[in-house]
Image (tube, rainbow, N blue to C red):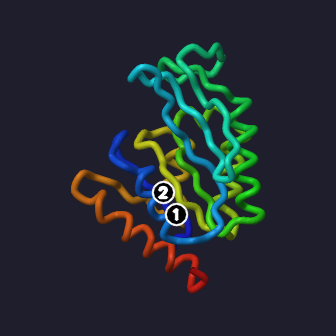
Amino acid sequence: MKKNLFLTGPPGIGKTTVIRAVIEELEIDVGGFYTSEVRRGGDRIGFDIIDMRGGRGILARVDLRSPNRVGKYGVNRADLERVGVSALERGIAVSGLIVMDEIGRMELCSKSFQKAAIRALDSGTPVLGTIQDRSNEFLDAVRARDDVEVVRLTQGNRDTMRLVVADKLKAIIGGGI
C-alpha cells in the first residue's frame, strides 16, 4: 500500500476542503503546512503559508519584490523555508500524519523546501498533500515515486472523495485511529 497520498485537479475544485475534512475525521496529530489565498477587495493578492500548529508566513504577494517570481507573484523564499520547511521537519519528528498543501510552482523556488519534502516522503510518516497539475522535473519525480498515489478530484467525485481519502489513510495508519 502506498503511504503518501496526493490530491490533484484544477484550482478551486476542493482539494484543500477535502484535506481539512479528512484531518477532522482522523483525530490524529497532524504536522506540515497548508497555503491560503489572501484577498483584498475581492482580488487575490497573494498566498500565506500556515504551519498546522499555527505559525504563519507570507508565501507570495503581487507587490513583493523578489528574484523568485511565479506569474504576477513575488515569492517569499525566507517565509517558505521558515514556516514550510520547519513544519515538515517537525511533522517528520513528532506527527502521525504530514500535510503538504500544496506542492506547486511557488514551493519549488526553494531547494531547501524540495529536500524537506523528499525527507517527509521518505520518512515513516504518511503524507497527505496536494500537488499542482503541471509538469516539471520535481513534481513529475514526486508523482512517479513507488510510494505515492495521486488522486484526481473532479466535479463528479469531489463530494465522495473525503470518505475515500479518509478510508485510505485509516488503512495506511492502521488501527490507531
> Looking at the image, is 44 positioned above or below residue 7?
above
Identity, as a three-letter code, of the amino acid under mark 2: Arg
Q: Which residue is more in the foreground, 149 or 92?
A: 92
Q: What element carries label 1?
A: helix
- Give how far across and how far down residue 151 sits, in percent: 39, 59
Q: Which residue is at 51% across, 29% downward?
A: 38
Give the alpha-carbon distance from disc 2 to disc 1, as whole Å.
Answer: 5 Å
Which quarter shows the C terminus? bottom right
Is 124 on the left-hand or right-hand side of 14? right
Q: Which mark identifies residue 10?
A: none
Q: State the image coordinates of residue 107 (x, y, percent, origin top left).
A: 60, 37
Q: From the image, tell me which residue sits under label 2.
A: 20
**Which residue is denoted by mark 1 in the rendering?**
23
Q: Which residue is drawn at 67% across and 34% down?
A: 57
Identify which residue, 27 or 122, lies in the foreground: 27
Residue at 52% x, 54% y is: 129
Q: Left or right: where does residue 25 sit relative to residue 49?
A: left
| Outermost residue, left side | 156
Residue 133: x, y in percent? Answer: 40, 43
The kind of residue on which mark 1 rests is Ile
Q: Are marks 2 and 1 in contact (CB under 8 Å)?
A: yes
Please provide percent x and percent y for residue 161: 34, 63
